Amino acid sequence: MLKGFKDFLMRGNVIDLAVAVVMGTAFTAIVSSVTKGVLEPLLAVLGSNGQLGFGVTLVSGKPATFIALGPIISAAINFVMVAAVLYFVLIMPMKTMQKRFYARNKVEAEPSTPADIALLTEIRDLLAERAAAEGSDSGSGRVRTPVT
C-alpha cells in the first residue's frame, strides 16, 4: 500500500501540479494587489458620487442594498490574468520543451517495404536449404553446427 502511494507521489505530473499550484497562488497575490490598487479605483469612477463604487442600489437611500459589481469584475479579470500568465509562462514553454525532447529521442521504425520482405524470405529459404543439406532435424527448426 505504501509502495503504491510512493509511486503515485513520484509520478512527474503530481509534482508538476504541486509546483503549478504554488506558482499560481503566488502570482494570484500579485494580480489581486494590482486590481485592488488600480482597477477597482477606475471602476469606482464609473459610479456616481453618492454610490459606494461601481454597482447598483436596489433600494434608494439604503446603502446596505448596494450590489457592488466592481469586485466581481476584478475577480474575473484576476482569473483571466492568472490563467493567461500560467499558460504563457509555464504550459507553453513546457510543451515546446517536451516536443523538442521527444523529437530528438524518438526513433521511428520504418515500415517494411516489399523488397525488405522479399529479401528476408530469400534468406530464410537459403538457411532452410542449408540446414536440410547439413542433415538438420526438420521438426525442431534448429540448424546443427559442426563441432570442431
Image (cartoon, rainbow, N blue to C red):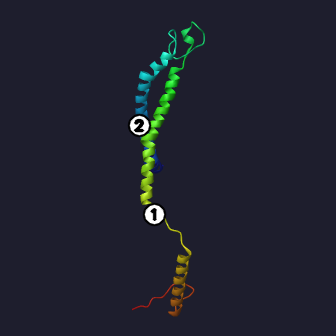
Task: Read off the residue under disc 1.
Answer: 107
Disc 2 element: helix
Q: Is residue 46 visible?
A: yes
Vertical relation: 116 (above or below) 59: below
Using the image as rendered, state which of residue 135 and residue 1 is in the foreground.
135
Q: Residue at x 45, y 18 (%)?
A: 41
- Callout in the foreground (2, 1): 1
Specify few, some or many for label 1: CA neighbours under 10 Å numbering under 14, 14-19, or 20 or more.
few
Disc 1 element: loop
Vertical relation: 89 (above or below) 59: below
Task: Read off the residue under disc 2.
Answer: 23
Using the image as rendered, state which of residue 95 and residue 129 is in the foreground.
95
Q: Is residue 63 left or right of residue 102?
A: right
Q: Residue at x 45, y 60 (%)?
A: 106
| Residue extending farthest top | 61
Q: Whole-percent x and y of residue 6? A: 44, 48
Q: Is residue 6 visible?
A: no
Find the distance from the CA under tag 2 to the CA under tag 1: 35 Å
Using the image as rendered, state which of residue 6 and residue 32 is in the foreground.
32
